[in-house]
Amino acid sequence: MARRKARQQAMQLLFHWDLRKTEDPPATLDSILRGYYGSLLVDEDTVAQPVRDPFASMLFQGVVACSADIDATIQKHATHWRIERMPAVDRNILRIAVYEMQKTDTPPPVIIDEALELTRKFAGEESVHFVNGVLDAVKRELTPPTVS
């Protein structure tokens, strides 16, 4: 599966987690994974069972495990926005991108481009500017300046 589709799956899984984490008792990661992969996925013109992608699962579980640190990083760079007030789609796309920047060797420009594509598909152009601004600030913080 292409990484773009895996990121889309991870975003959808995180969306479910984000909405269900306040349930009493909170939904488990396993129940979210089972529910997602046990359902039908509508993608463009097809209906099929989602294929479990290891990269999507890694992103989902990694973001959840590091969510407090990731949210703090996002909050630091999302001027005038509290994380809980952000649209859920934007918030979860940002979480995936920040996790990837912090924990993988994928180049930040690729991560940002992929995040912006997800944002265009699921949120809209207004959100693209917001997500781009936050991720650019995170990238500047995480990428040491080059010395010539």
Image: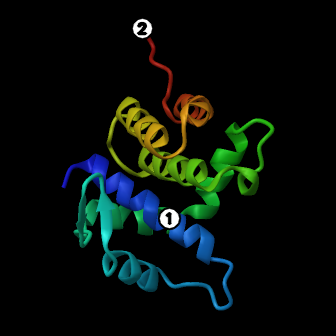
Please tell me whether mark 2 sits on a helix, a strand or a loop: loop
The number of numbered badges drawn on the structure is 2
- Label of residue 14 in the image: 1
Q: Amino acid at mark 1?
A: Leu
Residue 6: image location, x then y, percent: 30, 56
Quadrant containing the N terminus is bottom left
Instruction: Residue type at mark 2: give it.
Output: Ser
In the rendered structure, the answer to whether residue 130 lies left or right of residue 93 reads right
> Residue 31: x, y in percent?
44, 85
Residue 90 is left or right of residue 80, and the answer is left
Res. 148 mark: 2
Within 10 Å of the Cα at label 1, are there few (<14), some (14-19), or many (20+) other Cα atoms? many
Inter-mark Cα distance, 2 to 1: 41 Å
Residue appearing at x 60%, y 51% in the figure: 91
For the residue pair 134 and 86, the one nearer the viewer reads as: 86
Point out the image quarter for the C terminus.
top left
Q: Nearer the viewer, residue 62 or 83?
A: 83
Q: Nearer the viewer, residue 66 or 144?
A: 66
Task: Write the residue at 48% across / 31% down.
Answer: 143
Q: Position of residue 56 (x, y in %)?
A: 33, 61
